[in-house]
Amino acid sequence: MTRPTTSTAAWQPGMPGANNLPYGPAGRPAAPAGDGHGPQVGAPTVTIGSYPDYPSAQRVVDYLADNRFPVEHTAIVGTNLTLVETVLGRLTTGRAALIGAGTGAWFGLFIGLLFGIFTAGSWIAVILVGLVIGAIWGAVFGAVAHAMSGGQRDFTSASSLRAAQYAVTVDAGVADQARQLLGRMHMTPTGATAR
């Protein structure tokens, strides 16, 4: 019986013993999943219509659902997304304190309710004390946080994503059925392309 010689050199691809190594980062490379060209994607889809707003695309999917179409094979895809930040107003230290007081009051109310459940005496007083203390601390933290910002971002805003158009896509296997139903809806889609 021959014994393999021990080598001080590290194992290299093509050397004997490759079949004894496990798959993964320290051993043999794992076989790529699928065709090796990226993450697996679902079934091929077909765009059965493009609409200028979300309610129109939603109406199409509702219509398909009402007519017993398998809507689990449907998707609404927003394209050409834009982030819109609407400025609501100027943020002063007083307004930051007021917003903080409102947030703190909600938190204090929650804590007061929790303690009020386990109080043998006046539980309403415990809830009111929690609400007041929460509002005071919230106002203090709101004002301090705004003062520490050093004049950066002195406004309040709300952000939303908007799409230029909304495409309704279905799996390729049920695309003909979806098109027939859409033909009865009298809502003409603007395009139908395969993806």
Image (cartoon, rainbow, N blue to C red):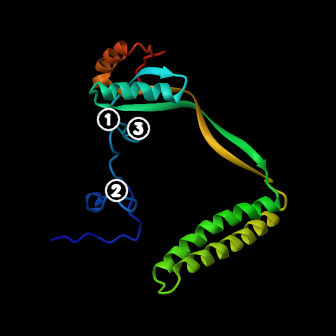
Decide: is 176 above or below 126.
above
Q: Nearer the viewer, mark 3 or mark 2?
A: 3
In the depicted view, which residue is nearer to us: 20 or 25? 25
Q: Residues within 10 Å of mark 1 (few under 14, many from 20)?
A: few
The residue positioned 32% from the left and 29% from the top of the image is: 65
Q: Is residue 50 shown left or right of residue 31?
A: right
Decide: is 118 above or below 44.
below
Q: Which residue is mark 2?
A: 28
Point out the residue furthest to the bottom here: 120
Disc 1/disc 3 C-alpha distance (Å): 27 Å
**What amino acid does circle 2 point to?**
Arg
Decide: is 116 above or below 93.
below
- Asked where in the image residue 187 lies, by quadrant, the reply is top left
**Residue 195: % across, % down:** 42, 25
* Marks 3 and 2, the one that precedes in the sequence: 2
Task: Count all numbered tags in the image, as a single digit.
Answer: 3
Q: Which residue is mark 1?
A: 72
